[in-house]
Image (cartoon, coloured by chain):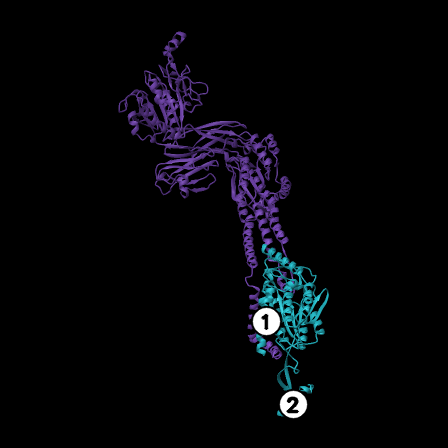
Chain colours: A cyan, B purple
Amino acid sequence: MSSWNADSGEEEVVQAQIVESPADELLDPSVLSSIGGMDFVSRMVVDGTMSGIHRSSHKGGCSEFEDHRPYVNGDELRHIDWRLFARRDRYYVKQFRDETNLQGWLVVDSSGSMKFGMSTISKFDYARTAAACLARLLLKQRDSVGLSMQGAGRTEFLPARTRSSHFQSVLQRLVQTQPAGAVGIEASLEMLSQRIKRRGLVLVFSDCFSDIDPLVKRLKHLRSRGNDVIVFQIVAPEEVTFNLRGDGEFIDLERAMPSMEVDFARIRTAYQASFQRHMQRLEDELRMAGCDRVVMTTDQPLADVLSEFLLRRQSLHGKAK
Amino acid sequence: MTFLNSLFLFALPLIAVPLVLHFLKRRERKVVQWGAMRFLHEATTDSRRMRLPESLLLLLARCLLVAGLVFSLARPLIHWGGGSAVADRELILVVDDSLSTARRIGGDPVFNQIRSAAEKVIADSPTNLPFQILLASGGGRWIGDKPHAPNSSDGKAALAELAKQQPTKGTGSLMTSVRKAMSAANERETSVRPRPTQRIVVVTDGMTPAWSGTDQMTLKQLQSTIEQSKLPVKIQVVEVESSINQFRNLSILQVKSENDRVGVKESIRLSAEVHNTGTVETKPCRIAWKIGDKTMGHSEVAELSPDQSTEVFWSTRIKEVGPVAIEAHLLQEAPDDLPEDSVAKRVLDVVKRIPILIIDNQSQSVEADFKSQPITFLTSALGYDAEEAGDQYHSIFAPTIVSAAEVASEDLSAFDAMVVVGTENDTPELADLLVPEVRRGCGVWVMISSEPDQELFNSNWFQNGESLSPLPLVQSPNDSLLADLADPETDENENADIRIHPPSARHPATRVLSDQQRIDLDQVTLQQHAFFQSLTIGDEISVPLRSNRGEPLVIENAIGRGRVLVQSFPISLNATNWPVTNSFVVMVHEWMEYLAGPSAQAMNLTIGSPLKWRFEDRNQRPVGLELPDGTKIDLTQDAERYGVDRAAGMFHFHATRLPGTYVAKTSVQSETPLSIPFYIPPSREELLAQPASDEQRVRLSKIGQFDLARSSDELTESAQAFWSQQKESSSITGGQPIWQWIVLALLGLLMLELLLAGRIGQRRGAVSETATQRLNNMQQLVKTDRFNPSSAEKSKASRPKATTKTT
């Protein structure tokens, strides 16, 4: 009992701190120091208006030649390599690698379920900290960062900008938004797919506890438009292990539903099975949609998780190269 | 349901303790704001959610545990429902089978009416009501071991047994029987079953002795017992109609003999007391005297008007040694309405000789002086010359003469009486040797020497009342000078001989001596005698003989079973002329009989006194006993109980409840099989039975719960009322205890509680797995699932897509 009270107390303290924290505090210095030195490298080539370390999908221009490919109808004639035509008597189009700047989109889930945090900080806090960190990293790389999330009953959308001052407005949105309601990340993704013009990197921060099908549908849509989608699934350790003692009442964080009395121990196995089914299906669906998925638990140090993720991305990037 | 310790029920609110604890715990219940509700919903839509939570089961078990503990401490009783309630009721029939119920009315004994009335009471009762019959005579004798329903086999056996019953010669003690029936019900009361509700029906002929001993005090006690303790008892009395105008009955109230131990061929005189207990005058008739089946003689009985009695005598000699029952049988021309009391018996023990010991204590010589005057007089009176029997006549008392010094070496237990001649050679040992013999029943006759040493006598024979003499000797008043001077007349008296005051006929030692017509006791003179301390008021010392001056001459003492006569003068011619009078022989015989009496075997007994028979060898040992009702008991079955387990010893039988002849038989295989008859006459009250007085009946009817009626029909209604009243009240008392079952259930509950608590505790324990481990495990699981052939096909379809996109 006492441990419970202690836990919930801690939780309240953490929440209070988060709510009143100024925007800068979202940036965990230890996180930034551990990931700051690394380049944020997209797995896929992304179009960018600025030359960065990201490869552009634009072939041609002043950029570095990469490859030839057979000509198909619709290709611009100016991209045809006439020398090769002379040699092979076939049309080939020259392809160039262009280092452009990346358009990164942060999609943070602000549904009620993200408010949960028992022995750790809430999932939303974890998510926005992670989002802020990655936003800063991208901006530091001179990539542009945009934001789409639900806030105050409507979808908040910040177009992608490269300016460093833009970072402050991103942080402000993140800090001001409080998780509530049942409206999940699907609306934000919908908004994003409507507004997005260029291909880019979509970073989704969510617990993915909503229905898988609508989520995957939207993610697929984004993928089909050539976006690189990374889903950071943030879960609380209690949600994974269901390590609760005794029995109690559960109040839904999203919907106003009657509370549910359960004997924790009694349903633990069933819960775990249900949870596992969900996670497995989610993973399968996301993989099929070609989305990357990173599962983070709020008890893990954010720095470790992010740096581990970036290392993995870098190695993939290396391979792709 | 009732509770033996209902106070414990006040602890019942303790059930609230687990409840309160539960709700307190509920108040501290966690409220979790949970995000992942979808998994919860999925988990709880399982059928498991519908099951009673284990915590509720645990709460239930704990509440039941407390309640069970409280209940078991309160010791609840479950009541017999409906049919089984009858088991707690019983009907006790007290059937009067006393001698008076044998009276014939129109040739039929009254007992037949009593029996049919009893049977009717049973028949009128509910068929499943257990009954038991108590025969009133002999202090109450049960038929069957406990109440049985009339339709059960035991009940039928009891009814068959009742049909076989005949009136006994006993007295029906109805009040004793009622008390016995009530106490039997008390004994049936156990912690398991309450005291049964009793309806006691007494069926009697209403003659007086049946309620004898029923004085006002007894009735009051019974009344208070019933009323104060609120015993569930209903006592009803049915008096069958038994008064008749013409009741012809002569009864022999008793047969007496002067002595129950007689010598062979000794003349004995028997007397029979005949009483007309009927209502009509009887004609002259005869009494036949029988030994066994053989009629030995007759006596005439004169006509007797109602309530008149007469005594007839008959003399005989018996030639054979051994106990013999002499039967007096009334022979009348007109039929007797109660023939059972026309027969009476007397059992005589015919012996060859009764050994007595004469102790010569006149001098210090080692050998007895056979020729001394007192011894010669004594032996002559008994018909002996010293120890030799005379030719013509000798008494059954066969003397052995020893000196005082020889006593210690004699086997004193062989003698039935002793005579101590003289107290000169006084040694304290002699008196001390004799005291234990007196205690066992051997009589002692002590003759004080002439001019005895007073102090020596007192220290040896009186010993402050602890020895044989009940009184010490005192100085003779003649020695007192004052007495001489004060009363000159005493001189004259002094010179005159002392004579013997005629003794009382009531004292058994002087019954014959008192016959002044035939005995010349008035001729006896004494020259002198020793003086006993004068009696003070309150001294209860029997004085069989006194002098004409009122001084005790012979005083009597009783020690144990035996008697002691201390005679204050010697039997010598210089002291008295008694030995030369004919009364001396009478006196010697009578006193020897009197003294030897207690050691004789008692064969004419009263109800309740034990049968006893001393046997010297195996041939005399009784092996069987026949009771008055014909029952035969094999004594060898329980030899130790009857004292016949040894070769020589004392047979005893205590259950003499009914009057009549008891015959103990020695083994038929022995050379001289012996029948030892014992006779217990019916009580005089029973023989003289009269209808109960109205006053007595009024007293009886005054007792609560007591109904008096003339027929069983009159009682049926009141019985029904009683049963219905008791049925209601029986629910208050009694029941089947169930606490042992509750305790068993408690143990079960305790096990359940422990099991549940253990299970819940185990499950509530922390999960050691961390979230990361759990997720990794999931990953592992997913991977193994991938390689699982069954799911391989599913994943095949999805894989190419993913790979094409990533490349």
A172 displayed left or right of B754: right
Task: Indicate the quadrant where residue B346 lies.
Answer: top left
Task: Indicate the quadrant where residue B218 lies.
Answer: top right
Tell me the subunit letter for badge 2: A
Residue B328 position, x and y percent, is 46, 32
| Residue drawn 72% across the image and 73% down it | A195
Q: Quadrant of the C terminus of chain B?
A: bottom right
Q: Is residue A133 visible?
A: yes
* B220 vs B448, nearest the viewer: B220
B205 displayed left or right of B555: right
Q: Which mark is residue B797?
A: none
Residue B121 position, x and y percent, is 59, 42
Residue holding disc 1:
A38
Task: Indicate the quadrant where residue A83 lies.
Answer: bottom right
Q: Secondary structure at mark 2?
A: helix
Q: Is residue A207 visible?
A: no
Residue holding disc 2:
A82
Q: Secondary structure at mark 1?
A: loop
Look at label 2 and name its amino acid. Answer: Trp
Tell me the subunit letter for badge 1: A
Vertical side of B18 occupied by B542: above or below = above
Q: CA distance from mark 2 to mark 1?
A: 41 Å
Look at label 1 and name its amino acid. Answer: Met
| Residue drawn 62% across the image and 50% down it | B20
